[in-house]
Image (cartoon, rainbow, N blue to C red):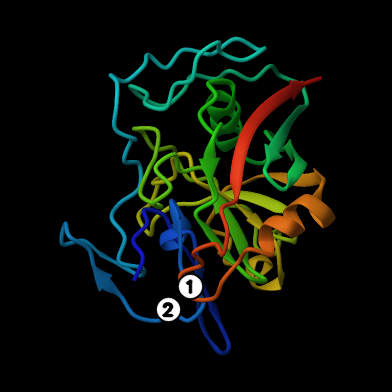
Amino acid sequence: MRRSTTVLVVLLALGALGACGSDEPSEGVIDPATTGADTDDTGATTLDGTPDAGTAPAGGAPATSGCPPVEGAATQTRTFAGPPPDCLEPGAVYDAVVTTNKGEFTITLDPASAPVAANNFVFLARNQYFDSTICHRIIPNFVVQCGDPTGTGTGGPGYTIVDEPPAAGQYQVGSVAMAKTLNPNSAGSQFFLITGSDGAALPPDYALFGSITAGLDDTVAAMAAAGTPGDGVPSEPIEIQSVRIVQR
């Protein structure tokens, strides 16, 4: 079974449904057919055989977690000494314009519902963290999971953030949420786009920090078309070329 660090899990009438890297859409995603637990190389038991989330990509010393410039940092950083400070301006609206090899889509962030996750996404995007990364897990009618620079489902920024679960019934097609392991407060950088009814049926365990407001029916649909059953290894590379934050 493919290893990842983050996972999504939901129990449906016909069985278990998961998504994202280790136990549900987490820093990894579970396959809808997965019903048992595995043990990873560290001895930790997870639903998808994945280690805990938050492993930073190799290379370079951790950067001090200060707020990057509003226009974005001049250089890319992927490893940090700790979680970001509060970098959002009260009352401002934040859009993330995501350019992929399938086109462009826009995420409108929701700091009111998930302030920590929204701030974290802006912080990482402004540090060019997501640029030139792949979406490593895509499951039809479920989710597209991205945000791991290692492309393995086990990567993260070197820190984790607190959970901000939404109310039940808030996920829908086009929702954007943080992936995490079964452990509490284990989200880091991996996130998922809900692309079908199976994803909308997930339990309210993953911070819902935004929604797709442009490009859902074309760009995201083209990304989702690369999905495969089971572990969800994409049938072709799906790359995030850049994420740019528009503040208004």
**C-beta proximity under 8 Å, tags 1 and 2:** yes
Task: Return the x and y of residue 90 as percentages of the image width and height.
Answer: 71, 19
Write down the quadrant of residue 132 in the picture.
top right
Q: What residue lies at 33% left-to-right and 21% top-to-bottom?
A: 81
Instruction: Indicate whether 111 appears above or below 134.
Output: above
Label number found at residue 139: none
Q: What residue lies at 55% left-to-right and 54% top-to-bottom?
A: 145
SS for dot 1:
loop
Nearer to the camera, 59 or 178: 59
Nearer to the camera, 136 or 4: 136
From this viewpoint, which residue is outermost toward the bottom?
14
Label number found at residue 31: 1
Kind of residue at badge 2: Thr
Task: Return the x and y of residue 175 as percentages of the image width and height.
Answer: 70, 53
Rate crowding at label 1 as few (under 14), some (14 to 19) or many (20 or more) other CA atoms within 10 Å.
many
Instruction: Indicate whether 43 appears above or below 162.
Output: below
Q: How many marks?
A: 2
Task: Return the x and y of residue 1 as percentages of the image width and height.
Answer: 34, 71
Left or right for 148, reference 37? right
Q: What residue lies at 50% left-to-right and 29% top-to-bottom?
A: 129
Task: Return the x and y of residue 146 as percentages of the image width and height.
Answer: 54, 48
Left or right for 27, reference 53? right
Q: Pointer 2: what residue? A: 34
Left or right for 84, reference 123? left
